[in-house]
Amino acid sequence: MRRLLYSLPVAFFVVLAAYFGIALFSGRDPHAIPSPLVSEPTPSFALASLDASALSEDALKGQVTLVNFFASWCLPCRAEHPLLMRLAEQEHVPIYGIAYKDKRADTERFVAGLGSPYRRIGLDEQGRVGVEFGITGVPETFVIDKAGRIRRHYGAPLTADQVRNDLLPLIRELARG
């Protein structure tokens, strides 16, 4: 009986180590948040924008676009911002921003200070559109194909490696097809 009591913690540790070992070496990106919306049409929405027009899902059709949820109070959004600027300026990727749970004045200061990679910025002050997209925080980025379907979801700040190795090849593939 005593031997069994001593072997239980060892057995528990072995099971736990195996579980984490499988998770670690599975090749799955731990930052990837699966989205049930991938391959689905973009949720229907209409938002006021900074330029006094509206931003809706209709603006996302006809070309491959990115939708980037961000906020002025979000430090990772600030870190990701130069990468979005390069995507818009150098790669000519159309990016639409949605200011998530942010005030108009704060969003205006954010883009005035850092520049704007966005074709248009929708104001989602209550966070309802973010809920429709299923976001869990900011920044989050969605790749939308020409037909207005979500093709990829990035649930964390984009990195240069992701852009080079995954995002740009996907955009080019979708643009051809």
Image (cartoon, rainbow, N blue to C red):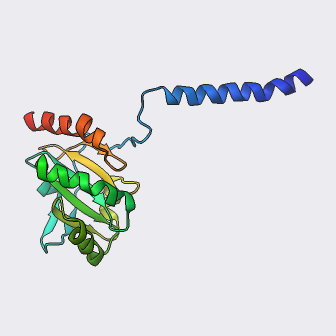
The relative height of residue 85 versus residue 19 in the rendered view (above or below) is: below
Kindly identify the residue that appears in the image at 76 percent across and 26 percent down: 10
Residue 121 is situated, as x and y percent measured from the top left of the image, at 20, 65
Where residue 106 appears, x then y in whole percent? 30, 75
Give the residue displayed 32% in from the left and 68% down from the top.
72
| Rendering quarter of residue 36 | top left
Which of the two residues, 52 or 47, is positioned nearer the viewer here?
Answer: 52
Q: Is residue 3 above or below residue 40?
A: above
- Asked if residue 1 can be seen in this view, the reply is no
Q: Residue placed farthest to the bottom in the image?
A: 105
Q: Residue at 78% x, 30% y: name it.
A: 9
The answer to which quarter of the image holds residue 57 is bottom left
Which x, y percent locates residue 149? 20, 44
Locate residue 98: give its quadrant.
bottom left
Q: Residue at x 20, y 50 (%)?
A: 66
User: Do we see residue 143 in this rendering?
Assistant: yes
Q: Position of residue 29 (x, y in %)?
A: 41, 35
Viewer-side residue, 87 vs 45: 87
* 103, above or below 144, in the image: below
Q: Nearer the viewer, residue 119 or 36?
A: 119
Q: For this view, does 58 lie left or right of residue 77?
A: left
Q: Note whether 118 is above or below 27 in the view shown.
A: below
- What is the tally of numbered marks visible in this picture? 0
